[in-house]
Amino acid sequence: MSPEPIAIKGIRQGLLVTLGEGDWSAGLRALEARLGASPAFFRGGHVALDVGARDLSRAEIEDARVLLARHQVELWAVVSANPATEAAAQELGLVIDLAPPHPRRPEAAPEGGEEPPIEGAGPEPVEGAGPEPVEGLVVRRTLRSGQSLRHPGHVVVIGDVNPGAEVIAGGDIVVWGRVRGLVHAGALGDEGAVICALDLAPTQLRVAGLIARSPEEHRHKPVPEVAMVREGQIVAVPWHGGSLGRGG
Amino acid sequence: MAARVITISSGKGGVGKTTIVANLGVALAMRGQRVVVMDADVGLRNLDVMLGLENRIVYDLVDVIEGRCRLRQALVHDKRLSELFLLPAAQTRDKSAVQPADMVRVCESLREQHDFVLIDSAAGIEQGFRYAIAPADEILIVTNPEVAAVRDADRVIGLLEAEEKGPARLIINRIKPDMVRRGEMLDIADVVELLAIDLIGIVPEDSAILIATNRGEPLAFSSDSSSAGRAFHNIARRLLGEDVPFLTIRETGVLGRLFRFVRSEGD
């Protein structure tokens, strides 16, 4: 059976996962396959589920919550065009309205449905080529300890990424500032993703499935660097201008 | 005349919030300000002990909230200063006894009669922190020059930004001058650079603080006897809008860098 397409996009409060039309149990199976294909991207995330016009009972929504919880993902909202489904979700204590508390802040993630979503990759593992890159997300503030930014496309942070903060992106990560927290590029499996920063001194650096720590040595004058995967290892090189080829 | 409500918060416990609230309260009151220091750490009160007022408590914050007494009855007057009052926390209750709206209401009634309300927040980022920041016009973040304390301060600043609370300013407590000189302690510039908020005070480690605390007589009462006492008075003066230079407790070089930073943040 071919799974239903699943669309994923980054929103201000985490990820919005949209299940395509069709049978609920097939939808859940497709969701499970998607979670299993890129566990690092989803783990620890907050997900809002858009279930379309489906008429779902509390038990059916609970199934989705349990499935997500098994992959260490928290379901916090269910979006539906169906009032019965909305009522069931509310009874479970879930949010049904994604309107952000502070609308129209410049750094807010795109709200409308215009952003091209990542199409579901199906049950086969995502590797090498990876999904088509999607639109970038620009965040113009410093990410502080405890804050997490997750986006399926590229991410640009104009500000610092402090210790204890994390940025997890399906694509590249560019930080116009200092990186001292955790950054994970290519989290959907793209080993060709890169991380650029004016001062790259992260707690941990991840590209696709690879993990690296910063060298211990303390640099007095940081230079802009680019981190990428070369021969199965993450390396950081000073940036001297010019363009970057796709390494993967 | 409406009081400024200032919440003192830190994230991490044990960085010296309560000491700072007690001493700032004294320093402001010595400058003729009408001050209420409020202990919002319900269940773990100790601001009263530091001020030496423990044995004079009759009613507390929760009594006020639950209507068992009038606000004025719960205020403990510090006889050493005509304008300093303590609103103690309840020791036998927990944080669920207080809601953010309660704090806003209590502070609204305090505003009319006073110039400053200083709220000593609980450590952590849970209920006790949430209700302590609810009524605040300004926030003072207290940290120590150590990695864990700075990390937690950063977390708290992030939460304040998300709630659009503030402005938040920074107090770095327990600086050990000789360790900074030897490069064994996080330096002030590093902390300010990471947290990226305005610095309002640097308080050196001082054994006189411990002695004063145990006696229930905040160091700020004798302002010139110790460097920490002077630091508290300097913070009070900065709160009142004076431009007071920071105590020099660091190597040359860092100073210039620090000041440039603070200045560019303040513009």
Image (tube, coloured by chain):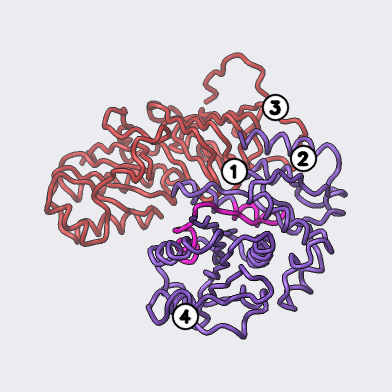
Chain colours: A red, B purple
Which is more toward the observer, B248 or A90? B248
Quote the CA–CA distance across marks 3 and 4.
Answer: 54 Å
Q: Nearer the viewer, mark 4 or mark 1?
A: 4
Look at discs 1 and 3 and give the one toward the viewer: 1
Q: Nearer the viewer, mark 3 or mark 4?
A: 4
Quarter of the rendering containing residue B267: top right
Confirm whether residue B15 shows in the render: no
Disc marking residue A217? 2
Amino acid on which the number 4 mark rests in the picture: Arg
- Which image quadrant is residue B228 in? bottom right
Label 4 with label 1: CB-CB less than 8 Å: no
Label 4: few (<14), some (14–19) or many (≥20) C-alpha neighbours in 10 Å:
few
Q: Position of residue A171 (x, y in %)?
A: 46, 31
Crowding at mark 2 (Cα within 10 Å: few <14, some 14-19, many 20+): few
Secondary element at image label 4: loop
* Dot 2 and dot 3 within a common chain: yes
Question: Which chain contains the residue that carries disc 1?
Answer: A
Q: Residue at x 66, y 74 (%)?
A: B51
Q: Does the magenta portion include A65?
A: no
Q: Chain of mark 2?
A: A
Q: Earlier in the sequence, mark 2 or mark 3?
A: 2
Mark drawn on residue A177: none
Q: Which residue is mark 4?
A: B93
Q: Residue at x 29, y 56 (%)?
A: A65
Looking at the rendered structure, the secondary structure element under dot 1 is loop
Classify A201 as above or below B140: above
Total labels drawn:
4
The Cα–Cα distance between marks 1 and 3, rounded to whole angstroms, is: 18 Å
Residue that carries the numbered disc 1 in the rendered image: A162
